[in-house]
Amino acid sequence: MQRVKHDFSKIPENILSIWDRSRDESILQTYDVNTEEIETLAEFPYVIEAPNWSKDGASLVYNSNGLVYKFDLATKESVLIETGFVDRCNNDHVLSPDGKSVAVSHQTIEDGKSRIYTVPLTGGTPQLITPMAPSYLHGWSPDGKSLAYCAERGGKFDIYTIPADGGVETRLTDAPGLNDGPEYDSTGEYIWFNSVRAGLMQAFCMRVDGSEQTQMTFEEDWNMWFPHISPDGKWVVALGYKKGDVEPGEHVPHKNVCLKLMPGEGGPTRTIVELFGGQGTINVNSWSPDSKKFAFVRYRIRSEE
């Protein structure tokens, strides 16, 4: 989804626009933090994005072409999740802590702006949660009671929470520039997010009431996006864009990026994966329930025929 003005000066060869993904192919992979092994689960001749790992560890949920799918890790087959009129879903979606529902961000047809809906994971009628737009979902509290999201209100992108059944939203950040990617840790006491307030995009952590906003990464050469904390709290994985390759508030596709790992309590990061990707690679939390692996998507551009 496009939230800021993007730099079109660095366009891959033979691609008319950095946002033209018509020739993208997707490779769904996992990374094992203990063995450092990368496993390829499946390849797709089109764009898939942002895998979530199911509570039972048996499947992944991803979006593609506006729809949401469940990928069975045993059979390596994908099944459509019926979401009714919510058929323009972007890559901001999460699963409920009880594993029964999926919350999605859907570009509503009336104004093209993203709003958050919840739908049973088995399929069903969508429930509108955020009438105000745009709203981009990133987190569901462990107790199932709240959603956390990035929203633009009055020209400013900040982090908000709202009851999971809808209601009054609460603003948690007010720092200048983009504040994005909020997700709860497994204790429900903290929210991780990313913000440009430090100059480059960096990872931050705060209490769920918005207090104690603390910078967690201090990269001099990388813009750090979407910090995802493992269920056991030991690790955080985040997406890195090289400084100067994008503006701090950009997360575009078609870039050479990396995945960085850091301890959950903070500390130095280390690069664990280098890949071609960016937008869609790891927008939402994709840790396995046992905290041993996380899923991500790398991309390649299909040659012209």
Image (cartoon, rainbow, N blue to C red):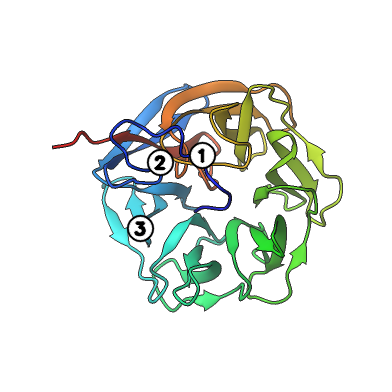
List x then y, in percent, for residue 225: 60, 38
Q: Which badge, 1 or 3, comes first in the chain's sequence?
A: 1
| Residue sitting at x 40%, y 46% | 19
Q: Is residue 49 left or right of residue 182?
A: left
List x then y, in percent, for residue 219: 69, 25
3D distance between C-alphas at marks 1 and 2:
9 Å
Q: Quadrant of residue 263?
A: top right
Looking at this view, is 271 or 121 the one in front?
271
* Residue corresponding to mark 1: 7
The answer to whether marks 1 and 2 mark residues whose Cβ atoms lie closer than 8 Å is yes
Residue lying furthest left: 305
| Residue sitting at x 73%, y 69% | 169
Q: SS at mark 2?
A: loop
Instruction: Specify the amino acid type for callout 1.
Output: Asp
Q: Which badge, 1 or 2, comes first in the chain's sequence?
A: 1
* Residue corresponding to mark 3: 69
Quarter of the rendering occupied by the C terminus: top left
174 versus 37 height, above or below: below
* Residue corresponding to mark 2: 18
Tag 1: Cα neighbours inside 10 Å, few (<14), some, or many (≥20)?
few
Tag 3: Cα neighbours inside 10 Å, few (<14), some, or many (≥20)?
some
Q: Which badge, 3 or 2, comes first in the chain's sequence?
A: 2
| Residue sitting at x 63%, y 73% | 132
3D distance between C-alphas at marks 3 and 2:
25 Å
Q: SS at mark 1?
A: loop
284 versus 240 height, above or below: below
Residue lying furthest right: 212
Instruction: Specify the amino acid type for callout 2.
Output: Ile
Question: In front: mark 1 or mark 3?
Answer: 1
